[in-house]
Amino acid sequence: MQTLATDNFGNDAPWFEANIPFFECSDPEITRVYYYRWQLYKAHLRDLGERGYIVTEFLNDVGWAKAPYQSLNDATAFHIHEGRWLKDNRYVNDYIDYMYTGGGNDRHFSESIADAVYARYLANGDLPFAIKHLDVMQHDFHLWDDHYDFNWDLYFIEPILDATEYSIASIDATGGRDGFLGGHAFRPTINSFMFANADAISKLAALAGDANTAAYFARTAAFIRRSVESHLWNEQFSHFMDRYKADNRSVHYGDFIRGRELAGYVPWYFNLPDHDPKYSAAWLRLLSPDGFAGPHGLRTVEPSYQYYMKQYRYDAPTGNPECQWNGPSWPFDTTLVLGAMANLLNDYSQDVIHSDDYVRLLKQYAHQHYLRGDYLNLQEDYNPDTGSVIVGLPRSSHYNHSCYVDLVISGLVGLRPRPDNILEINPLIPSEPSAPNGISYFCLENVLYHGQLVTILYDRDGTHYGKGVGLSVYVNGEQAVAPSTLGKKLIEIKPPQAVKSQPPPLNLAVNIRRAGFPIPTISNSDTEGIYQPIDGRIWFYTDVRNYWSASGSPAVEDWYALDFGHEVTIHSVSLYFYADELHFKAPADYVLQYWLGNKWATIPELQQTPATPMANGQNTVSFPPIKSSKIRAVFHNQKDAAIALVEIQAF
């Protein structure tokens, strides 16, 4: 694992080695994107200081996010599904705490966060945490009564608040003139989200011993399911489709929209549809070239729609196209469809979709992550007919409103989380060697599941790993399934053990509001990026700036100081430097100082790891606790390059 970590993450490898399950398969793009997506996920972790960690959707600030933290609740469920495979529970625990306390879930967009919390419990088995916010989950669920129509017994929303502006409902509500706002509709999306949240609350309440709440939300989920099947299934189109809530000269209340959308597959992401074969017939359009199957990605609407791929909206400063859901291929929607396909293949009896289809679309999705040539940079959306990036704005780089890791682990590899003490494995790869999208080998190593370390290995002919032919499973290093044919495996495992952990140390060097303390000061006069080393964000991408630099400084030494406003106790400091080996390098060395009386003094008894300053990774300095109101890092500059300080943390 150490070699894999270093190969994929360089100097930042230790964090990944400690936190992620390692993976490889016979398809190099699927494998490489797996590690890129973990790098992307870590880049979006944001330390809020006292409020712990959250996960962001954009690396750059956007005006519609919740200020000042830049959280967006439409992406949260994806973040929880992806992060449930981290070994350190702190990141996702903090994030869920944030969403259910202090208005973190501001209902800016429709969401399925309660369902994601339950899905996370299925993976880690931590029941006390899963039921921690059960009361707030119920409160948030009932707040959506303001989007409920008793005539149809359905929830409604305008597409933009479903995070899908310029959908058919909003475009046609304007007579084809626009579609950014308006177009309220009864949609398969929000109704599936509400079904999933109700179902999750019911199951969590049952686990908490609250039979009355469990029964109430079970009835609610069943009622939503019946309403979706009765009112949103369009027999003519054989598809789950919007009905208009809007009523004007262009559209009429209660009518179906006039075209299929990829969103019609969302109900299967939550196992909502009944097992009636008529529903499975909807999946034929997913595979059709004149349906949703674009040559370079899944279309969000079929090309037969009158306004397919018509560009309505442009970014004023750049003139670049803006976000639309009238055809472009979105990782957001692709995630939901692939997750729905995995459920269809695992939980339904049908003969429309096969495992080869899943692998083919996963490969297509993996390839979308390549921005140009060999460079990985996931963008907001793509032209499904050409593969080109559509939006491509500065905010779009390394976009985090989708899943990928979870689709590999729970789909391709087939680890199907469940609430009991059974480990279920059912890889979604074709068993026939001649299958066009066959996978000849894979290994998922040391994924943490219910407190057990699980390794799942497949070798079609036994030549790659030398462990035998077929599928093998190991639990805590012991073979639980000997090499055997593909297919569902059920393995009894030990119950999850309660994990007792010490409260993590508080990072004192955070100032997201850029007001008050801690106050940064620097050695040079260029204040660009002065707050970035204390914004709680760490990444080393070359195309999105995240550092303060002393670039252009003629001095041999430069410094970055923090004034905490009062005396604090500190015992360690971590420094992160960005380097591109051209303009920026790590400093030749550095010294940590603290304010003693009325002057700066070097902190004594320092233990510096690594001994030589390292770029694009963590440098940690430990020392006996000191008390001071200020600290300062003094950098000895390289002769031929400037330093770039990504982050400073003080504990």
Image (cartoon, rainbow, N blue to C red):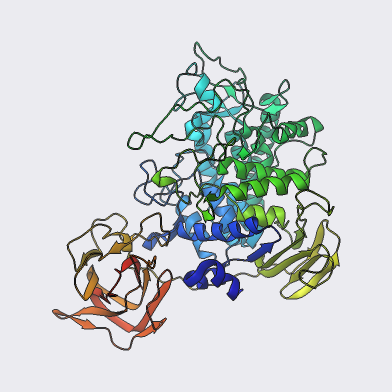
Number of numbered labels in the structure image: 0
- Residue 75 % position (x, y): 51, 46
Instruction: In this rendered view, identify the residue nearer to me: 39 or 350.
Output: 39
What is the x, y in percent for residue 237? 71, 23
Q: At which x and y percent is residue 197? A: 60, 43
User: For this rendering, which residue is in front, 267 or 35?
Assistant: 35
Residue 277 to residue 573: above or below: above
Q: Is residue 636 visible?
A: yes
Q: Is residue 451 left or right of residue 370?
A: right
Q: In the depicted view, which residue is nearer to us: 325 or 74?
A: 325
Q: Is residue 174 above or below residue 128?
A: above
Question: Horizontal placement of 116 versus 176: left or right?
Answer: right
Q: Residue at x 75, y 52 (%)?
A: 428
Q: Look at the image and tell me whether residue 270 can be seen.
A: no
Which image quarter: residue 26? bottom right
Q: Quadrant of the N terminus?
A: bottom right
**Above or below 575: residue 352:** above
**Front-lying residue, 27 or 567:** 27
Image quadrant in which the C terminus is located? bottom left
Residue drawn at x 21%, y 76% as measured from the top left: 556
Instruction: Specify the quadrant of the image occupied by residue 62.
Output: top left
Q: Residue furthest bottom?
A: 605
Name the spot of residue 178 as percent of width and height, x first: 45, 22
Q: Residue at x 36, y 59 (%)?
A: 546
